[in-house]
Image (tube, rainbow, N blue to C red):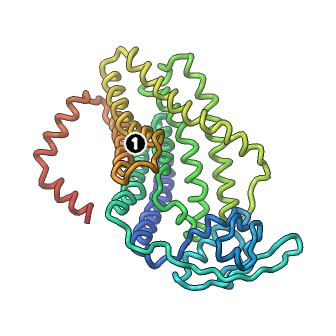
Amino acid sequence: MGASRFWLRVLLGIVFAITMGLHLVWCWTTFRFLMEGERIPNVGLIARISDRVTITKPTEELEKQGVRAGDRVVSIDGVRIGSRGQAFRVIRGLAPETEIAMEFARGAKGERVAARWPSGRFRKEPFSMADMVYAFFTNVFTPGMCIGLGFFVLWRRPENRLAWLLVLMLYGLSQIARFNGVFRMEYPVWMAIPIHFLVPFGTIVWPAAWLWFCLDFPEPGQAPRWLSWTRWVVGPLGLFFGCFIGVESVLNGEFATGFPFEGLFELLSMVQAPYVYGSAMGGLLALGYKLVTEKDADARRRLRLLVVGLTLGMGPLIVALIYGFERLGSGLQLASVLMLIFIPVSVGYVLIVERALDVGVVIRQGLQYAAARRSAMVLQALVMIG
């Protein structure tokens, strides 16, 4: 048991190093994105290039030069294009406000169409402080906290199934909100491939991990029978579609090909909303049922802490999404995203601490500690803002 636990932790350390390494690269990309916004060409053209490297809707400038929807991109600035990711990397490396030569192929005979494309600028003015704070918490702090805390709990308790579910759940939540998602294509191919896979995989798998976690917490076998069976529907469905979309994302992003199974995408679009909302509601029902029926005082305290943390973390974001995230001001958008930090903190706390304190005690002790260490916290906040 000791040897197997050792090698399991070695494997976990390797996986954590890769995952956190990719996150740190993403943090560096975010920093460059914010600092160099005015010196980046207009990468918006990539939204008009399909996974098969064809133009879905030409820009006005390209349309005037005879480019049509469905034309395949052959080259950009003299570089032959073989995938959407390669097209983005070429555009990203261009100078702004310059005319770039592009070549397209049309139809089965491959009739060539030459055109000039004005690269323009990604930003005409620097990012505001609100944008920078929003980017810091969505791209750097919250994902780093989710990844670090999930793997820390798993490192402490690798034999606990809840810890494995926690990693899947927190990683998926860390990928939901991204400030500069399209810029993940600027990485080299060897780095872009795992990112292409992990981002959609995490965002699709986390509802299934959430449901399983809620059904098994604090101890497996306590969920009501009328609800427990749903794990065997949601779990395989989430893993299958997560792997399928992850591989599809890799093939489309870097190899300009994909699975020829259009029916699966139609099925996914049909079950996506019931899968996500059904998993979320099922998890909340399981926690609510256990909170009411749990007789052990310690387990009930941990459940209460978990429910409060999840309500604080997910509640504002769910309300914002129902109301319309784009309709909110930047301050409310930032606040709803910042509240997500309560999820990894509350879940990690109830798993790591053997005997969780009551919510009121935790808040009082936190306030006393904050008052005693206010000078250090102010200094830390200033360093973080700087």
Query: Residue most toward the right?
Result: 109
Tell me: 173 left or right of 266. left
The residue depicted at 66 percent of the width and 43 percent of the height is 241
* Label 1: element kind: helix
- Is residue 103 depicted above or below 376 in this figure? below
User: Who's the residue at 77% across and 70% down the image?
Assistant: 71
Q: Quadrant of residue 385?
A: bottom left
Quadrant of residue 235 within the rendered picture:
top right
Relative depth, front residue between 205 and 44: 44
Q: Position of residue 264 (x, y in %)?
A: 74, 43
Residue 5 screen position, x and y as percent: 47, 43
Examine the rendered structure and indicate whether residue 72 appears above or below residue 133: below
| Vertical comparison of 348 with 248: above or below | above
Residue located 12% across and 54% down the image: 375
**Going 48% across and 27% down the picture, which residue do you hit?**
216
In the rendered structure, the answer to whether residue 283 lies left or right of residue 265 reads left
Q: Is residue 352 visible?
A: no
Q: Is residue 227 visible?
A: yes
> Given the image, on which type of amino acid does mark 1 rest?
Val
* Other residues around mark 1 within 10 Å, as few (<14) / some (14–19) / many (≥20): many
Foreground pick, 59 / 257:
59
Residue 65: image x %, image y %?
72, 79
Please tell me how many numbered marks the rendered image carries: 1
Question: Which residue occupies the foreground of this view, 110 or 208?
Answer: 110
**Mark 1 — residue?**
153
Q: x, y percentage for residue 177? A: 47, 51
Q: Is residue 266 left or right of residue 35?
A: right
Is the C terminus in the top left, top right, bottom left or bottom right quadrant?
Answer: bottom left
